[in-house]
Image: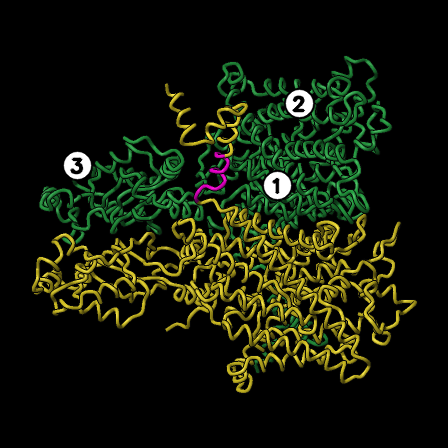
Chain colours: A green, B yellow
Amino acid sequence: MEELVGLREGSSGDPVTLQELWGPCPRIRQGIRGGLEWLKQKLFRLGEDWYFLMALGMLMALVSYTMDFAVRSVVQAHQWLYREIGDGHLLRYLSWTVYPVALVSFSSGFSQSITPSSGGSGIPEVKTILSGVILEDYLDIKNFGAKVVGLSCTLACGSTVFLGKVGPFVHLSVMMAAYLGRVRTATIGEPENKSKQTEMLAAAAAVGVATVFAAPFSGVLFSIEVMSSHFSVWDYWRGFFAATCGAFMFRLLAVFNSEQETITSLFKTSFRVDVPFDLPEIFFFVVLGGICGIVSCAYLFCQRVFFGFIKNNRFSSKLMTTSKPVYSALAALVLASITYPPGVGRFLASRLSMQQHLDSLFDNHSWVLMTRNSSPPWPEELDPQHLWWEWYHPRFTIFGTLAFFLVMKFWMLILATTIPMPAGYFMPVFVFGAAIGRLFGETVSFVFPEGIVAGGVTNPIMPGGYALAGAAAFSGAVTHTISTALLAFEMTGQIVHALPVLMAVLAANAIAQSCQPSFYDGTIIVKKLPYLPRILGRRIGSHHVRVEHFMNHSITMLAKDMPLEEVVKVVTSTDIAEYPLVESTVKWRSRPSSLGVVDLSKDRRPGACRAAPGQLLESQILVGIVRRPPLVQALQAEPLSWAPGHQCLQDILAGGCPTEPVTLKLSPETSLHEAHNLFELLNLQSLFVTSRGRAVGCVSWVEMKKAISNLTNPPAPQ
Amino acid sequence: MEELVGLREGSSGDPVTLQELWGPCPRIRQGIRGGLEWLKQKLFRLGEDWYFLMALGMLMALVSYTMDFAVRSVVQAHQWLYREIGDGHLLRYLSWTVYPVALVSFSSGFSQSITPSSGGSGIPEVKTILSGVILEDYLDIKNFGAKVVGLSCTLACGSTVFLGKVGPFVHLSVMMAAYLGRVRTATIGEPENKSKQTEMLAAAAAVGVATVFAAPFSGVLFSIEVMSSHFSVWDYWRGFFAATCGAFMFRLLAVFNSEQETITSLFKTSFRVDVPFDLPEIFFFVVLGGICGIVSCAYLFCQRVFFGFIKNNRFSSKLMTTSKPVYSALAALVLASITYPPGVGRFLASRLSMQQHLDSLFDNHSWVLMTRNSSPPWPEELDPQHLWWEWYHPRFTIFGTLAFFLVMKFWMLILATTIPMPAGYFMPVFVFGAAIGRLFGETVSFVFPEGIVAGGVTNPIMPGGYALAGAAAFSGAVTHTISTALLAFEMTGQIVHALPVLMAVLAANAIAQSCQPSFYDGTIIVKKLPYLPRILGRRIGSHHVRVEHFMNHSITMLAKDMPLEEVVKVVTSTDIAEYPLVESTVKWRSRPSSLGVVDLSKDRRPGACRAAPGQLLESQILVGIVRRPPLVQALQAEPLSWAPGHQCLQDILAGGCPTEPVTLKLSPETSLHEAHNLFELLNLQSLFVTSRGRAVGCVSWVEMKKAISNLTNPPAPQ
């Protein structure tokens, strides 16, 4: 009977069912359909978002590849123009300089006119956002267009302005993730969830790095090291998935566009594999790391000082506030004039693009040995087969050019970082480090032309390996990261120098981290973004500092029995986002207990506002949090019955103004380390301190900062 | 005048000063001395412990290298014996089997007789310790010797028993770190600090992996993924430093011992670099990852079931409890008999050591193409130049041998993991995965003998690349880690397969993580070690579960006004490590308040035990924690005045029994996710829940586990 009903239903209502019943093996097909349904449910259940991570990776790879493609076309057009314009010096000079000046001023003007927050690298802001601070402007999708266009113009200036794209891509990726998240919330109807959002943004940061360098491993690790002080393995897995999708897509597009035969790394090297370096060379690698660390400290220091100078100098600060494009154009003109190839530029290898800089510096030959007997001519045109000839000048030799490059780029880079336009500062630092390493490597090769181990088979020294180590060590020191070592391997597709490069990076980081804040932290400090400093040194004395020593004792509290006029006074006189709500402000410990009772009994409506006998004595017991906006709304909603003393806060709370529970409280005995850990781990900005249930104070980043700075510079005895 | 005094002092009291004054450039020398002093202070200030991490890395590298060296000698002796013993089958069989049987039973007996906790891999225990549980036995230094000797014997059995050394090395390294930490505390006099200890142990785990594979990057990442759910970047840097020291030392020793010309990777491969794989092969890599994921699920399931069977079966469980060496010997006999080369062993490539297994499987030739026209003879002796010949049998071809190897090793490996002796289970899994990958790769090579892209230059398929991907994917799936991909690159010294290997590992992990607990988590479950499960799926519904829904309401509290006899009753009837201390147990909310007052006023010594009027009403307000040992001591100290009702807890507390502050409390409104995060992040085992200052419950791992399991399997409605 049931079967018949099924059949009838099948034949009339649902023709597919009938068809299925008549087809072969209905059971198997049903089983398969059930299996697919199960798989679908398993893959797309609420809360899963792998498809979302995948979409993010693919989209960002598409953006990255398209941008690269467009930039390459513009650069080729510029090169063609410069080549074809004839031999007149003025025309050549103009064609060399006008291009970047126009692009930079457009980039700066365009991005600034749309949103002022689209300038710079964006990593410091993303770091601040990931630590829990809300900077709505920075995640707005309208930044996206401004940043993409601006960044394309910046990159199209090539090695003249000498800036990269990592930072902005992290920012773009995070913006995209935030936008996709909003779209998702709107379509699926999943409730918003802050921790899920942060997870998403953390994965997006990894995608940003991975889609620029096609390096998923170092993308994930670099973003972790730069962005956070703690990370969860869960986020790390998600980051890997998204970054792999992004990197795969990025390289896949290159293959589809016939640039590559298959998926390979970006800056392929061909170092000798059997004996890439002799054992004693390890020592030189570590020394190189130390040098990179010292130079990075100098760079970070000068950069911060120059930034301060630009901000405080009367002329430049006026220029920066009123006409940013003019400042940008001036800076670009200076940079372009210096890199003009027939002028000083010939000692700066300025005809090479940044990619070619890296390719040539990672060359596996020793230039000093090759130019010992025969010197190559200074080529009129760039020779793609012998990029490294650009680094050679018959009079100054390799050493002169490389040293001159380092000295000039040092301040040119600092100047370039002050231009207010979307630009990344990682790549130039990476190239600069490679040049340091190359110079060092060529020197070693010059001193030991036969290689270091004299007996047996001699292996000549490969300065390219030193360039790799230098690039990783210098960029690692500037950004305070170690994963740059891995990035160097992923970018070059060779991992033969694993240990020496890692040791150089560690040496450089040891020096840089103990002397200077990282590039991004420095920017956060200069830009006065909120941040929570690390507890450095981990001294033993710091373990004795407790919350009661540095908490803010004077907190503004709302009490349930507070008359409304007082509540209004509190709300209008302060601008805190959330108020702690206590049972009663009467402090019966400090005053005689009778006083509290008398005070309240004076109230004209004793039933409503006087606390019950028990509650009265639970004075200052923290019961929840009241947020400002709903409180203001509730206060505005009932302005009629504002006869003084008639109503108290309790009535408003009962009338609909929501209170939120306090899910986590500190004790006065909590140590500074514990509190710092909590703030870092849970991305908190402030916590209330309760003692025996009473609200006695609060701790926010301000108090933490003060306490941490007191650790290193103890306050003068009073 | 002052100078004169200085001179006189110099000439009489301190002759060095005089000498210095007379020497050249006293100022410069003083400056140098000052600089050195500053450097020394900077490097060795209290709290810094880089030298300690370095020592740890170097020591463990020394142990690892020495062990490898000793094991190699023993294995060579065995091979010599087997070769020289003549052609008699019985003698050869005996010489093949007796050796491992003796070694295994000695290893098992020796290590078990010293400490029962030295068996197994040790990683599950280390994971438990790092999550905050104290397992004193496992960190005892006397385990060290037992584990080193036992592990050496295990490794000396070679590929017969087919076990590795990663897990025990992590354990050894952690033991060493704990020991060094104690030594340091004793010598420098620095106070003990629990968070510092955990930092140290986390770095030690990384050292353990790094010194086995000479792979610092993946050592750090693997230990992070296996050990913890959250990680601080600070620990990660320290881990890198220690792991780099360890890996460097380990490879340095190999160079000093003239095994290597310079520092290189362990299992050097020579894959084609220009086009390592064609683009469509990516698809096969992902499929291989899926296969590895499915096989790993089967492996993990069977392993757990067999473990349970061994434990519950009457015969085997009796054998395991009474005479472990006998069980070990029996298992070893079975394994050795099967691998006997003239028997079944010739289809298992059993004459190869595990290192040779890997070397041969990562071979860059396609075996199926090489044996298509000419088949190599089955060699009488192992040919070190053509290791892969061992994998070939004229009748069964490559496919037959590889498939037979996989089927047999599947259950042999499960059997081997039950032997109670120190042994690592990562390496065999890695080799097994490589064999899966090789089989898959040879199949692909067989189907597409010309390579996949037909037009233009054809690139024959390299099954070695698939072996690499298979090894990384299978070991990654079994351990639920992604860093095995990086490990594969670091071990082989080539990173040309970066993206396909990573994609295979991700695919394998996606399947394994959604179906089975990892090998280590499974062991933790089977061994009934305490653990905190992850909140899987991250469903939206789980965000509504709050602490009040699952906390333990019935907590044992001590009140300050509790008579001593009641305190004694509480202490003797429970065995909690720490008791919450409240002001008074009188619940005036539930009882009429007069009752509380009356109860206490009955007290014969009202002055001492009756609370002050204010405190009385603060009933159940949590004021601190009393630990069991000092409380018991204090109770035993004054047994004389135990007249009933005469004394209360307050007197004892005032008399010296210390109370500790509660630094962190939960609220009933805290969500399950928040509480879980806190437990994981801060390595906590239990927290008290307070509402308005009152202790209302507590949450420990037990309640968390129950709540998490209720999320996935909602309890039946009551």
Residue type, label 2: Met
Q: Is residue A404 visible?
A: yes
Q: Which residue is mark 3?
A: A644
Q: Secondary structure at mark 1?
A: helix
- Foreground mark, 2 or 1, reads 1
Q: Which residue is mark 2?
A: A408
**From what the image shows, is residue B134 above or below residue A26?**
above
Find the residue positioned furthest to the bottom: B315
Q: Is circle 2 on the same chain as circle 1?
A: yes
Find the residue positioned furthest to the right: B373
Marks 2 and 1, how far apart at CA: 24 Å
- Mark 1 vs 3, N-terminal side: 1
Name the image quarter holding the N terminus of chain B. top left
Pick the front one: A146 or A298: A298
Q: Which mark is residue A104?
A: none
Q: Which mark is residue A505?
A: 1
